[in-house]
Image (tube, rainbow, N blue to C red):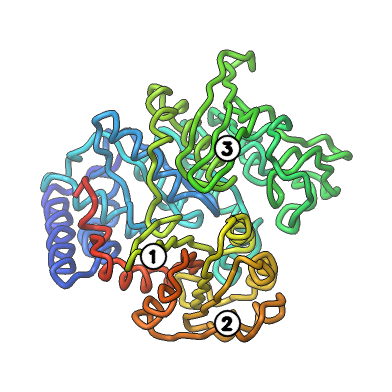
Amino acid sequence: MKKHNPFKIFLSVAACRLTRFFLRILHRGGTTLPGRSAMLFDKKILEVVSRGMKIIVVTGTNGKTTTCSMLRNSLQESGIEPLSNISGANLLTGITAEFTAQAKLTGKPKKRYAIVECDEGALKKVVPLIKPRAIVVTNLFRDQLDRYGEVMHTLEEIKKGIALVPKTILCLNADCSLTASLGTDVPNPVYYYGISTDAGSADSSSDSLSDAKYCIKCGAEYVYDYHTYAHLGGFRCPKCGYKRIKPFTEVTSIDKIAAKGSDITVQFHNNKMQKTDSEKIHIGLPALYNIYNGIAAIAAYECAGWKRQAITSSLANVNSSFGRMETFNYNNVEIQMILVKNPAGCNQSLSYLSSVNEDYVAVFCLNDKTADGHDISWIWDADHELVANDPHCKFIYVSGTRATDMRIRLKYAGADESKIKLIEKESELLEEMTSHELPVFVLPNYTSMLSLRAVVSQATGKKEFWKDQKNK
């Protein structure tokens, strides 16, 4: 590691702390600007303030925040308070801010463990500095096309990051043909996880395969033995033979998926792919994609060499993370906020709503700011028909800078126009959507989630995310 000037280290840490302090007095999160302040004095201060720490990095299109939450919760239940960018500020500046703010003025880390959510495009800038023990890649889908381009570009960005840390263990989703390909021809140790053909609740329909319809090796069309959702499942290429790799950690049975969580059976294998033991596990969050997040967290624990029992037992108690299945109660009305940002994730959320066996209110919030991606055409690829035609969906509200586009999308999905209402102000939206005394499900994209969440949090007395962190 390049030698860093002690005085510049001191200035970096001091600048970061002061910037965050003043921002939070102003009730701003202080997630990225403190990192920029620190980097003014030492561009690679992250290398110093993370030195010697045991770090797991989680990247991929969907599931990063929830997987990190699961890992963080398990460590906390074990009596360890890890450093973690809980706000979701997952670019170099946000990660630098988190590490630097929690370092001593000498730059020495105060904590031994870190769980880091990292943007796919930022991986190549972050991992060479922090040298993680493991990198978890959850999945790859089309996301923010104006920023990333097609999904193959995102894959290449992750490859660039992996190439810079050849000793780091790769923890890969075996069911995603794109993600699994990252384990090919690399010096890194590779650990796979997935859901097997025997998982009885897995979706057998083809769903949407547009993100990875053709073989990444030869271009032939994949054949699927089964699907879980989207392009995830038992893929194989009939031409070149590229196929799903048998995972070390594998869900062999999905026994129950309900609103309060899921029950699964997980089979573990050793390095010789011999079965070692199996375990029944409860994951305290609903939906199939949270089963993937759960086994990703288990696999990460295995890669880190930590005690498996700590993570498998803690998954029953995992709480929803920032804007992801997060629940609020306002005037005795339950509000659940489910972040959506691309077709695959949105389809899973819409499917979850359509499975709710009671009347409810649906709220769609859509912005097109830089952090969201200016291209919102993805809403036409998501199956909004699932909710638009659901008899249990009694009222629909739309909001955000592109609310009109969302209203048009719902109209074409078959929703009764008379039950769709556009509301611009978040405070007015909160009152309207809870006026029916029915459960409310809010599906916002990123910046619309942040603005509405701030209003709902204040109204319900929930702390701002940075005040609610134990590790601050």
Mark 2 near mark 3, Cβ–Cβ under 8 Å?
no
What secondary structure is marked by label 2? strand
Q: Amino acid at mark 3?
A: Leu
Front one among 145 and 410: 410
Report the residue marked by disc 2.
Answer: 420
Question: Disc 2 or 3, which lies upstream in sequence?
Answer: 3
What secondary structure is marked by label 3? strand
Report the residue marked by disc 1.
Answer: 333
Count of marks overlaid on the render? 3
Q: Position of residue 155 (x, y in %)?
A: 61, 52
What secondary structure is marked by label 1? strand
In the visual, does 304 lie left or right of 13?
A: right
Front one among 228 and 185: 228
Residue lying at 37% horizontally and 83% vertically, measured from the top left: 428
Mark 1 near mark 2, Cβ–Cβ under 8 Å?
no
Res 141 quadrant in image: bottom right
CA gap between label 3 and label 1 equals: 39 Å
In the picture, the disc for residue 129 is none
Q: Amino acid at mark 2?
A: Ile
Q: Is residue 346 above or below residue 159?
A: below
Q: Position of residue 154 (x, y in %)?
A: 59, 56
